[in-house]
């Protein structure tokens, strides 16, 4: 029987699509170093782990559709620490940041409406746009420029009467680019001038390096009704599996609309919310140590990549991802080859081919995204293996 065109036209995740090849390699006894996925290896806060061990409920019940009030109060307190004044009523707890993105699209845009974002972009945004029937229009950013945000005239060239929103990820996944005050003010001016929504995915806001400053879309009071913030506990506290995120906005119409979708899916994860709320009480030193560790790993990765002939990496200033151009004919073929045909001393490396983070055909074909979520020693080994693989790959391009 035929399945929907919506699904047949949807691309597979560039982060996970090669997993079957990795699993097959592992079944042969090959150790795989995973740089393809942003799954931190850093220990989850002890208070969070203890909260699971000490559950005193006798019934694991539904929670309110918008999430527990106690958790929403904790999230509001967290935002106050970033000089943003949100009430618990402005906050909706979601099943991960992914649900927050999808619900934002479904609430704020109709099928056929247009969304502007940059490319490369987080691949799952494209899947959510497909589900919502939204057309994505992209602005190209280049590795040579550190994937800097394009100037205002490039945004305005794409705006039509069907444009409803601009979507950013700051700090950026997949590039690690950080948008500063000038760029954020530019976006604020655009959305105010054209009365657009600004969806700002800020799940990596803690992870900022080189003394740079994080500026949230929520800091611009003049567009408070236009802004929808996307947040998550996954990366901040190394809790990807609890599936707890949040949608934050001052716009009451959006919050009311999102609640309808929340009621339709009943409630966010009960156990996840318990863990998330406990995490909010963790000593600030926890995050300080995590940020310092990622900064170390970032430097290890970039330094190691710089020693491989023909590799060009963009230095990230946020998140825990880096994009690199490789001297290969096709990065997807190369990534697959590393899992099917290459091994050195019983080991290989897995990266995410970057073409899946682009919408325009032909872009990113020699690039990969790497997540520096492994410890420093494993990162060095992974990049060493990458260099060995490039030296043997039959599709290597000499420059």
Image (spheres, helix red, strand yellow):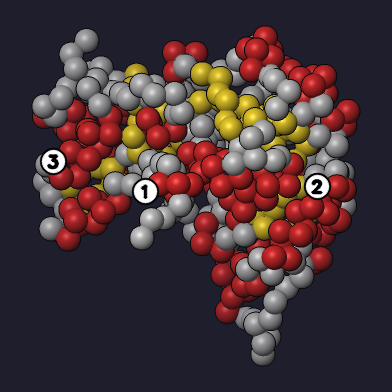
* Image quarter in which the N terminus is found: bottom left
Residue behind mark 1: 16
All told, the count of numbered labels is 3
Between tags 1 and 3, which lies in front?
A: 1
Nearest to the eye among marks 2 and 3: give it: 2
Q: Is residue 279 above or below residue 373?
A: below
Query: Percent from the top left, x then y, of residue 184?
Result: 72, 23
Residue 28 image point, x, y percent: 13, 58
Q: Judge whether 175 appears above or below 63 on screen.
A: above
- Element type at marker 1? loop
Q: Secondary structure at mark 3?
A: loop
Mark 2 closeness class: few <14, some 14–19, many ≥20 residues within 10 Å = many
The residue labelled by disc 3 is 342
**Point 19% across, 17% down: residue:** 397
Of circles 1 and 2, the one toward us is 2
The residue positioned 57% from the left and 60% from the top of the image is 243
Q: From mark 1 to mark 3, how far is it between C-alphas?
A: 19 Å
Q: Which mark is residue 70?
A: none
Q: Quadrant of residue 264?
A: bottom right
Q: Are marks 2 and 3 in contact (CB under 8 Å)?
A: no
Instruction: Judge by depth and name the residue closer to the eye, 379 or 74.
Output: 74
In the picture of the structure, the residue carrying the numbered disc 2 is 254
Q: How dense is the environment of label 3, judged by Cα within 10 Å: few (below 14), some, or many (20 and up)? A: many
Q: What residue lies at 38% left-to-right and 31% top-to-bottom?
A: 354
Tell me how far mark 1 sits from mark 2, CA to CA: 32 Å
Residue 367 lies left or right of residue 24; in this view the side is: right
Q: Nearer the viewer, residue 349 or 378?
A: 349
Residue 190 at x, y percent in the picture: 76, 20
């Amino acid at each position: 029987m035929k399945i929907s065109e919506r699904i047949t036209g949807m691309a597979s995740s560039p982060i996970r699509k090669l997993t079957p090849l990795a699993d097959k390699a592992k079944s042969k006894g090959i150790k795989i170093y995973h740089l393809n996925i942003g799954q931190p290896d850093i220990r989850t806060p002890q208070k969070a782990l203890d909260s699971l061990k000490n559950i005193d409920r006798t019934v694991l019940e539904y929670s309110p559709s918008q999430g527990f009030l106690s958790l929403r109060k904790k999230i509001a307190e967290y935002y106050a620490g970033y000089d943003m004044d949100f009430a618990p009523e402005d906050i909706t707890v979601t099943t991960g940041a992914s649900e927050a993105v999808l619900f934002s699209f479904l609430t704020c845009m109709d099928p056929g409406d247009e969304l502007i974002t940059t490319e490369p972009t987080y691949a799952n945004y494209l899947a959510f746009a497909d589900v919502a029937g939204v057309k994505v229009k992209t602005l190209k950013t280049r590795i040579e420029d550190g994937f800097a945000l394009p100037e205002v005239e490039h945004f305005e060239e794409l705006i039509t009467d069907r444009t409803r929103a601009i979507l950013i990820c700051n700090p950026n996944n997949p590039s690690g680019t950080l948008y500063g005050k000038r760029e954020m003010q530019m976006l604020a001016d655009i959305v105010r001038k054209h009365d657009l929504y600004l969806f700002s995915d800020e799940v990596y806001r803690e992870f900022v390096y080189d003394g740079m400053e994080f500026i949230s879309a929520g800091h611009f009071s003049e567009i408070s009704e236009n802004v929808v913030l996307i947040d998550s506990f996954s990366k901040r506290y190394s809790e990807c599996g609890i599936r707890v995120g949040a949608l934050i906005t001052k716009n009451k119409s959006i919050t009311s609309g999102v609640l309808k979708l929340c009621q339709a899916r009943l409630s966010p994860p009960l156990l996840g919310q318990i863990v998330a709320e406990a995490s909010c009480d963790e000593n600030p030193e926890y995050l300080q140590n995590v940020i310092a560790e990622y900064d170390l790993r970032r430097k290890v990765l970039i330094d190691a990549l710089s020693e491989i002939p023909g590799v060009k990496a963009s230095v990230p200033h946020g998140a825990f991802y880096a994009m690199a151009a490789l001297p290969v004919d096709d990065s997807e073929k190369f990534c697959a080859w590393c899992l099917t045909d290459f091994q050195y001393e019983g080991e290989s490396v897995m990266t995410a081919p970057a073409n899946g983070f682009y919408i325009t055909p032909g872009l990113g074909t020699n690039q990969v995204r790497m997540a520096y979520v492994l410890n420093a020693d494993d990162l060095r080994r992974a990049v060493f293996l990458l260099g060995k693989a490039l030296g043997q790959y039959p599709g290597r391009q000499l420059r």
